Amino acid sequence: MVNVKKRSDCPISNSLDIWGDKWSLLIIRDLMFAKQCTYGDFLKSDEKIATNILASRLLTLETNGIITKHDHPDSKAKVLYKLTAKGVDLLPLMMEINLWADKYFTLTEERKAMLEEVKKDKEAFIRTQTLALLSNS
Amino acid sequence: MVNVKKRSDCPISNSLDIWGDKWSLLIIRDLMFAKQCTYGDFLKSDEKIATNILASRLLTLETNGIITKHDHPDSKAKVLYKLTAKGVDLLPLMMEINLWADKYFTLTEERKAMLEEVKKDKEAFIRTQTLALLSNS
DNA sequence: TAAATTTGCTTGCGTTTTGCAAGTACAAAC
DNA sequence: GTTTGTACTTGCAAAACGCAAGCAAATTTA
């Protein structure tokens, strides 16, 4: 899975070849909400990803330039994962997933509050959040 | 896979539980570009989905209210698949995938031309396309 | 400073999903 | 009435997944 093979020349298909599985966008979600995560942080997420699958997905995302590994300021044993600019560019897509889910699922109050901001001025929200995420890398 | 089990209460995760695999969004893509497709049309797509996987995905999408089956006007042997309103609501998300892919992959001229329209006025494009798709259902 | 714990993985193995080929039932064409 | 088209289903091997255990290096604890 690391060396992604393109199934066609379609850009949608090419995109799905990289992050179109049940786990990758959840990793990216965690990074967008937390700005940075350790391996252990990902494991702690509600969906309970298996450790071997997590390792495999992190490698694929890194290989495809979506995330990068960084030294942790506090400890050599820890690794910080962060989104690259290419990864941060997935923010609009992630917001649209949230907006769609807002229509068809029950969201937490916190998530709803965020989406109110998004709905008020989508462009501005994306711009602000993008800058915040990039300032971190 | 038909009766989707939620891995958590996160709306992103809930969404991925329905269409977060390598094939579902390609089926939805075909329906958005063509407005309606037969089983055979899906099989003809460049990515060459296996027939049993196609049947399984169509059932999951139907069960979750993303698509519906319709009689074909020309023949009782054919089935027309169309997007529901819930499915059409995935259009903004699909456009964001295209816009992301536009930055990081090579697109066909036709797709690029469409994206120029989108970039000029995203809201207007989505509105027009949504109405066009809904008028069909 | 030696032992225990944390952290980021890898390995083994049984289960599930996928992909390919072939088969089937019904409708339509010849 | 036989062949072709359409929408699937079935069987089986290969790949991916999920769980538990293991491991090496770094860090904390006693």
Image (tube, coloured by chain):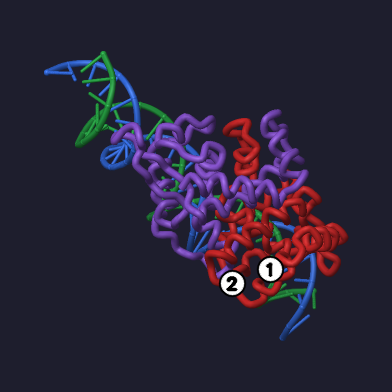
Chain colours: A red, B purple, C green, D blue
Query: Residue B100, image x and y in percent?
Result: 72, 45
Mark seen at residue A115 = 1
Which residue sits at x=51%, y=56%? B86
Residue B133 screen position, x and y as percent = 54, 46
Please state which of residues A10 and B137 is positioned toward the viewer in this rendering. B137
Q: Can residue A78 be seen in this view?
A: no
Mark 1–mark 2 Cα distance, whole angstroms, equals 10 Å
Quadrant location of residue A137?
bottom right
- Between A137 and C1, which is closer to the camera in this rendering? A137
Q: Nearer the viewer, residue B126 or B95?
A: B126
Q: Which amino acid does label 2 sit on?
A: Leu
Q: Earlier in the sequence, mark 1 or mark 2?
A: 2
Please indicate whether residue B26 sits to the left or right of residue C20 in the image.
right
Q: Name the residue under label 2.
A: A107
Q: Look at the numbered disc 1 and give the secondary structure of its residue.
A: helix
Indicate the amino acid at tag 1: Leu
The 10 Å Cα crowd at callout 2, few under 14, some 14 to 19, many 20 or more, is some
